[in-house]
């Protein structure tokens, strides 16, 4: 269970980082 929770956390962090980088790219395009 602990391993699964850690994996889920990693996935969420990865998704957040992806969204953040996407937002940065979009911000650069608009500025």
Image (cartoon, grey):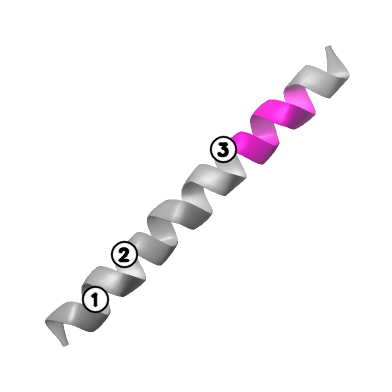
Q: Which mark is residue 7?
A: none
**Alpha-carbon neighbours of circle 1 within 10 Å: few (<14), some, or many (≥20)?**
few
Q: Residue at x 42, y 65 (%)?
A: 21
Magenta stretch: includes residue 10:
yes
In primary-sequence order, the first of circles 1 and 3 is: 3
Q: Which mark is residue 27?
A: 1
Q: Is residue 12 above or below residue 24?
A: above
Disc 3/disc 2 C-alpha distance (Å): 16 Å
Q: Is residue 19 above or below residue 9?
A: below
Q: Secondary structure at mark 1?
A: helix
Q: Residue 29 location in percent, x, y? A: 18, 79
User: Is 8 left, or right, of 14 in this rendering?
Assistant: right
Disc 1/disc 2 C-alpha distance (Å): 6 Å
Q: Residue 4 location in percent, x, y? A: 77, 19
Q: Which mark is residue 23?
A: 2
Q: Is residue 6 above or below residue 26?
A: above
Q: Residue 24 location in percent, x, y? A: 34, 72
Magenta stretch: includes residue 29:
no
Task: Tell me, yes or no, whether the two marked residues, 1 and 3, touch with CB atoms within 8 Å.
Answer: no
In primary-sequence order, the first of circles 3 and 2 is: 3
Q: Secondary structure at mark 3?
A: helix
Q: Is residue 25 above or below residue 14?
A: below
**Alpha-carbon neighbours of circle 2 within 10 Å: few (<14), some, or many (≥20)?**
few
User: Is 1 left, or right, of 9 in this rendering?
Assistant: right
User: Is 27 left, or right, of 7 in this rendering?
Assistant: left
Disc 1/disc 3 C-alpha distance (Å): 22 Å
Q: Given the current orientation, which residue lies at the most extreme top position?
A: 1
Q: Residue at x 68, y 39 (%)?
A: 10
Magenta residues, start to end: 5-11
User: Is 2 left, or right, of 19 in this rendering?
Assistant: right
Q: Quadrant of the N terminus?
A: top right
């Amino acid at each position: 269970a602990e391993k699964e929770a850690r994996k889920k956390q990693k996935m969420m962090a990865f998704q957040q980082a992806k969204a953040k980088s996407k937002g940065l790219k979009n911000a650069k395009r608009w500025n």
